[in-house]
Image (cartoon, rainbow, N blue to C red):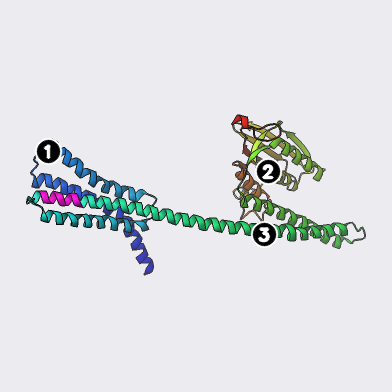
Amino acid sequence: MNLKRNWLRRRSEKLLPTLVAGLGSVLFLVYVGERLILYEGQNFHSNGFLADLLIAVTFILPLVAGGYHLARSDLPPSRYPRIVKWVFGGLAFFFFINSIMMAISSFDTFALRVSWGRWAASVGGTTGLLVGYIEARAIQRELEAQRAAIRAEEAENQRQWLDYLNGVLRHEVLNTANVIVGYASLLLEDESLDDATRAQLETIHRQGKDMTKVIRDVQVLLDATSDVAQLDPTNLSEILDAELDQLRDTYESVTVEASIPDDVFVLADELLPRTFSNLLRNAVEHNDADSPEVRLSVERVGDSAVVRVADNGPGIPANQHTTLFERGDNTGAKHGLGLYLVRTLVERYGGSVELAETGPDGSVFTVELPIAESATADGHADDSAK
């Protein structure tokens, strides 16, 4: 029953702007009727008629246009009833005042009194519409300011919780994971271990390293989502060279080919290296080739720098393409949290990432980032170019 009442109320509220426009239309029809019936079409071509028409339209047209505008404004329908009350309240008040003036005046022509009453109604209704609309706007701005303050407070509380969680991950969980990995590594150095024990320790060691990787990715995500990005010209070429050097040191069996122009600057921050460390690590860790290969190239295309990361792995199954960069379905999938982190960081910089090609001969990921307008050789913005 309450749902039906609420539905009827919302429906009736949406019809109120039509009522306001209809009131203006009725008053205009009354004006036309005055001229055709009470004045019998007299003086249609006189200057007095044109002045009278202008006065009538000046106070009637705002009601028609106001009702039309109200229905298409960003004011919520819940504000309409109060505006309509102002319209009819203004109409009634102004009409009442003028009725008293008509009663004590010396005018005794019925046509003149009808015109006077219609004019009073249109002036009162238009004035009420103006006052009601201004009041509704003021109330809406105040509510929006209150909501913005609440959202800001909630955002601050959320930021504090994210900082707390980041601290817990960094000082508690990550330290514990590192201890597990460290002790597992020490135990694996014991050559007297039987095969079953060694296999179990290798599992502990592998799972500990995976947990450490996930924790660090989560830390980066927390940093990326809790702070407003302060983007500066960043030397993409140097970052890619450093990440490729680290890839060679970590995976001695990988073959790396690179084509990176010098001093390609993009708008980014200190989190940019994680974008490419995750892409490059995925290209090796999920590569089952006897000799893993990674090919990286950078090309300027218009106002963007396009980075291509290719591998010779087994490709990505078709059923994973649509959710590859998603958070919900991908956290437990083959590529883990890394690609979601890549997308989050790239979008933070106003860029895009996509799986350009994939198949049994390998996959190609492309990252497109906005090129910095100008930068000096040390990576700082060139103020002289502004």
Upstream in the sequence, badge 2 or badge 3?
A: 3
Q: Which residue is mark 1?
A: 44
Q: Position of residue 283 (x, y in %)?
A: 72, 44
> Is 152 contained in the magenta span?
no
> In the picture, which quadrant includes the N terminus?
bottom left
Image position, residue 63 (x, y; %): 26, 49
In the displayed structure image, the side of residue 294 where residue 14 appears, left or right:
left
Span highlighted in magenta in the image: 112-120
Q: Earlier in the sequence, mark 1 or mark 3?
A: 1
Q: Identify the residue under disc 2.
A: 272
Q: Point out the image quarter for the C terminus.
A: top right
- Check disc 3 and report its element: helix, strand or loop: helix
| Residue found at x 81% / y 57% | 181
2 and 3 marks in contact (CB < 8 Å): no
Q: Is residue 251 visible in the rendered structure shown here?
A: no
Q: Earlier in the sequence, mark 2 or mark 1?
A: 1
Q: CA distance from mark 2 to mark 1?
A: 76 Å
Query: Closer to the camera, 343 or 161?
Result: 161
The crowd level at tag 3 (other Cα within 10 Å; few <14, some 14-19, many 20+) is some
Q: Amino acid at mark 1?
A: Phe
